[in-house]
Image (tube, rainbow, N blue to C red):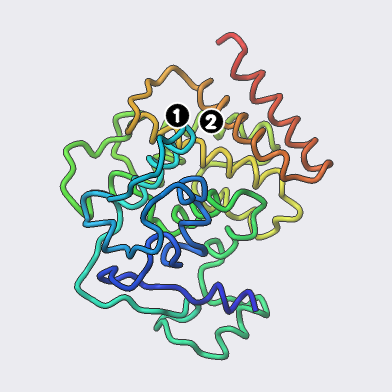
Amino acid sequence: MQAARIGIHWKLGNGRNVRFWEGQWLGNTSLAIIYWPMYVINEQHGKTVEEVWDGMDLKLTFRRTVSEQVMNLWWELVSLINGIVLSEEEDQIVWAYTSSGKYIVQSLYAVVNFRGITPVFVNLVWKLPVPPRVQFFLWLLSSNKLLTRDNLAKRREISDPTCLLCSEKESILHLFFDCCVASLIWEFISEVVGVELGQNFESVARFWVANKRHKVTNIVSTATLWSIWNFRNEICFQGRKWMGLKDVLLKIARMLKRWRPMMQQELGEKIEGVINQLEQKALSPP
């Protein structure tokens, strides 16, 4: 049963028993599936978390020179793993649907009958019609596990806690919603999809509950969140310069174009309309 498989995962301790790529220890699937283009050329298959991550350096090597696409995946993975702290405790297999981590028959029954006992928005990310890597990103965002600078500061001292797009302190709420750049992006996205989005996380996630009715809204808002995060990381890790709002809007449009082949014709046509509006806005004179 799918619900039972999803309910079982590793709780990371010292990382000696959990396989880095193949184990289910972050989110709802393995890193091998999420980062498949990188996994297939990596030389550390079957290695444990402890063997490849020492709290400072991610010790992965590859059989050949990586492409620009895989390099972008690498920076994304590095950003994610930087937030992982190993402990002296043993790794444990736990059940996700109880607070104790122990399996109880009633907890599985509750999930199967849509009376779930875990936060509703966190579980819904796996049903959104977007790529698995993006679902994984949403799970991290929903769980406040993305490595924004405030979360990084909980693990080690950082010299600059400010947002890379403005001068305020960076947090998940700030980066994706309160930042002046994010606010401008959401203002236009709300106009395109016809509903108010971007005041806070709940303003976006509330539409996940009725995904069949709000597929366009959910796909576009997810592409917006994902693009903001990627743009932020390009500035942080690759030295990209801020050149204006058009860069982010075009990034969202390109993201939607890559996802379009996954969609049925009617949905794809609606998304194509959104892409056109994004490109027109980005390329129009200021």
Residue 158: % across, % down:
18, 43
Vertical relation: 145 (above or below) 243:
below
Circle 1 residue: 181
Residue 123: % across, % down:
56, 65
- In terms of depth relative to the viewer, which is nearer, 42 or 227? 42
Vertical relation: 101 (above or below) 53:
below
Q: Residue at x 60, y 42 (%)?
A: 221
The residue furthest front is 63
Q: Residue at x 69, y 37 (%)?
A: 193
Q: Residues within 10 Å of mark 1 (few under 14, many from 20)?
A: some
Circle 2 residue: 185
Vertical relation: 68 (above or below) 16:
above
Where residue 222 sits, quadrant-wise, is top right
Assign a secondary structure to mark 1. helix
Q: Amino acid at mark 2?
A: Ile
Quarter holding the N terminus? bottom right
Quarter holding the C terminus? top right
Q: Amino acid at mark 1?
A: Val
